[in-house]
Amino acid sequence: MNNKVTILGIPFDNMTRKEFLSVLYKRMEDKEKTFLVTANPEIVMFAKSNEDYFKLLLEADFIAPDGIGVVRAAKTLNTPIKERVPGFELMLGLLELANMEGKRVYFIGAKEDVLNLTIENVKKEWPHIEIAGYHHGYFDHDDPEKIQMVKEANADIVLVAFGFPRQEEWIKKYLNEVEHGIAVGVGGSFDVISGKTKRAPFLVQRFHVEWLYRLIKQPSRYKRMSVLPLFLREIYKQKKRKSEI
Ligand code: UDP
């Protein structure tokens, strides 16, 4: 069911959202610890310029193709992937699973008020989730006591919302200390669950222009998004190199 598609050195797992969830569920049942990354073009480009982060991503157990940019890139390289697996939707899938199975979820990240609203909404939306604990994301991320605190909560799933690369760096340290559990960086997802940031309307999502919608709503994202053309340029370079081999 799974094979890898490498884009600018990052090995993406070629699975549908459903396949990801079924593999993750199995690992949760088997108590295997799991480092899940959802990587979009920004993350791929960041890894390209930062060797430590690049190596860190290679340590992930799974890398999901987050966003249409990654799917287009795979197609351009003649190694198509099945579908885009937006990080936000994968996280919702994990919360659904946790709700069905009464699993323990720890929520770490975002500002305190955002996190509190997130927890309120989680309790309403997924009442059977066992909230293993929660903590805002504004603390020294090198503090081992915080790792200990989350470890003691004995969660099946840890959602880390610090934004990249902070969240993946923290996850690595956390997973070094624990025996089991899925840990995944979820970026600004708590801002969405809390209702602070709205996701794009359905039609915008459907036509894969969520990035444009976000840009209009939040012009400060412009600098970060300007990475997309650079990403595409790198993809064409990789394609050219491949065709020369
Ligand atoms: N955040 C955090 N701790 C930090 C920096 C950021 O908890 O030290 C949170 C921030 O409040 C937001 C989330 O991380 O909820 C994502 O931040 P950002 O928009 O910078 O990242 P992205 O969504 O692009 O990954």
Image (cartoon, rainbow, N blue to C red):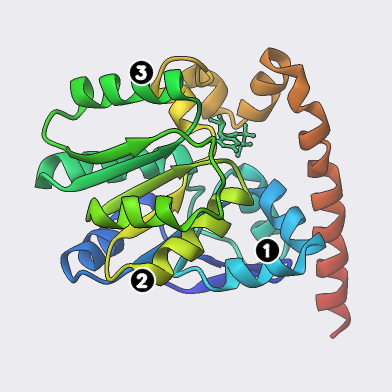
At 82% from the left edge and 61% from the top edge, which residue is drawn? 49
84 up-or-down from 134: above or below = below
| Residue 227 percent across, percent down from the top left | 81, 43
| Residue 18 seen in this snapshot | no
At 59% from the left edge and 62% from the top edge, which residue is drawn? 80
Compare residues 202 and 107 and report the one nearer the observer: 107
Does 175 sit left or right of 161 as displayed?
A: left
Select label 2 or label 1 by which is in front: 1
Q: CA distance from mark 3 to mark 2?
A: 38 Å
Q: Amino acid at mark 3?
A: Leu
Q: Residues within 10 Å of mark 1 (few under 14, many from 20)?
A: many
Q: Which mark identifies residue 171?
A: none
| Residue 185 percent across, percent down from the top left | 49, 48
Q: CA distance from mark 1 to mark 3?
A: 31 Å
Q: Residues within 10 Å of mark 3 (few under 14, many from 20)?
A: some
| Residue 199 percent across, percent down from the top left | 50, 21
**Which of the four quarters of the rendered structure image does ligand 1 lie in?**
top right
Q: Does label 2 or label 1 sit earlier along the sequence?
A: 2
Q: Amino acid at mark 2?
A: Met
Q: Which mark identifies residue 53?
A: 1
| Residue 51 percent across, percent down from the top left | 75, 69
Disc 1 Cβ-to-ligand 1 distance below 8 Å: no
> Where is the C terminus found, in terms of image quarters?
bottom right
**Local secondary structure at mark 2:** loop
Q: Does label 1 or label 3 sit earlier along the sequence?
A: 1
69 up-or-down from 241: above or below = above
What residue is shown with label 2?
1
